[in-house]
Image (cartoon, helix red, strand yellow):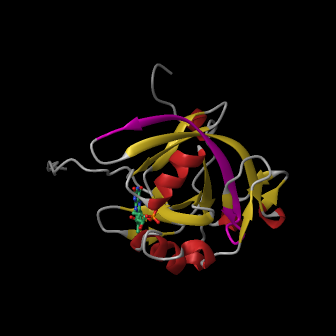
């Protein structure tokens, strides 16, 4: 197949769709973010590329903590709304029922089946976004979304995001077990 070069862009998909939360001026505020990924296994460290001018970023810088909340399909309108409007002009504190972490003072969304409390350990500014590296110090999961103590992704049903078509998606079908299916491959030196 002939390959065509296109303009470089953030084309690692799907991206997660997360709601990043922080207390700003004493109130919970949440922004939608897709530039979110993992940076370290143990301790678990998450990297969030956020514009430093966002209202949520102000809360993160001032408090040194933030939350990660995984919305499901049923929260798609609220999630998109939090990505369209800023807490600078709209009161986002009443969009969701929230609870505060018992480890860090950071607001989390009750309706999200998996949420995490993160402590900022490093901040790296780039041209547009600043990457906030947060150590995940506590994870909260709905009891019904656990199987043998582990997150059940089908129940958590995280919302995904693709770019540049700006699409929200949900998880597709399970394909195979990792660190396992590759053993069936007869390639390499074998
Ligand atoms: C699907 C989606 C993904 C987004 N991802 C990011 C992101 O990764 N980083 C970012 O800085 N802004 C992102 N935004 C934009 C912010 O969510 C938006 O500017 C928001 O209004 C900021 O809210 P705040 O000022 O209350 O913090 C995204 C918006 C949408 C709709």
Secondary structure mostly seen in magenta is strand
Q: Toward the viewer: 177 or 92? A: 92
* Image: 116 above or below 76: above
Q: Residue at x 46, y 29 (%)?
A: 187
Q: Residue at x 61, y 65 (%)?
A: 28
Q: Which residues are magenta?
A: 108-126
Q: Toward the viewer: 35 or 154? A: 35
Q: Toward the viewer: 181 or 23? A: 23
Percent across and percent down for residue 137 are: 71, 41
Q: Quadrant of residue 96?
A: bottom right
Q: Quadrant of residue 70?
A: bottom right
Q: How many marks?
A: 0
Percent across and percent down for residue 71 are: 59, 67
**Could one spot residue 171 in this view of the protein?**
no
**Residue lying furthest top in this view?**
189
Percent across and percent down for residue 147 are: 81, 57
Q: Residue at x 68, y 52 (%)?
A: 116
114 horizontally vs 40: left or right: right
**Could one spot residue 126 in this view of the protein?**
yes
Q: Residue at x 54, y 66 (%)?
A: 159
Q: Quadrant of residue 20?
A: bottom right
* Image: 61 above or below 112: above
Residue 24 part of the magenta-drawn span? no
Residue 121 part of the magenta-drawn span? yes
Ligand 1's quadrant: bottom left
Q: Toward the viewer: 145 or 55? A: 55
Percent across and percent down for residue 164 are: 29, 63
């Amino acid at each position: 197949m002939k390959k065509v070069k296109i303009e470089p862009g953030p084309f690692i998909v799907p991206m997660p769709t997360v709601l990043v939360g922080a207390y700003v001026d004493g109130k919970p505020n949440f922004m939608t973010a897709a530039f979110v990924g993992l940076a370290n296994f143990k301790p678990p460290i998450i990297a969030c590329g956020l514009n430093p001018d966002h209202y949520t970023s102000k809360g993160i810088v001032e408090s040194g903590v933030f939350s990660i909340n995984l919305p499901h399909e049923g929260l798609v309108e609220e999630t998109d709304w939090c990505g369209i409007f800023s807490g600078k002009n709209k009161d986002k504190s009443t969009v969701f029922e929230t609870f505060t972490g018992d480890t860090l003072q950071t607001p989390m969304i009750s309706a999200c089946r998996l949420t995490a409390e993160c402590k900022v350990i490093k901040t790296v500014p780039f041209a547009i976004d600043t990457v906030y590296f947060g150590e995940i110090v506590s994870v909260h999961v709905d009891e019904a979304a656990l199987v043998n103590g582990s997150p059940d992704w089908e129940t958590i049903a995280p919302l995904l995001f693709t770019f540049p078509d700006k699409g929200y998606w949900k998880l597709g079908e399970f394909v195979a077990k990792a660190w396992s299916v590759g053993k069936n491959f007869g390639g390499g030196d074998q």
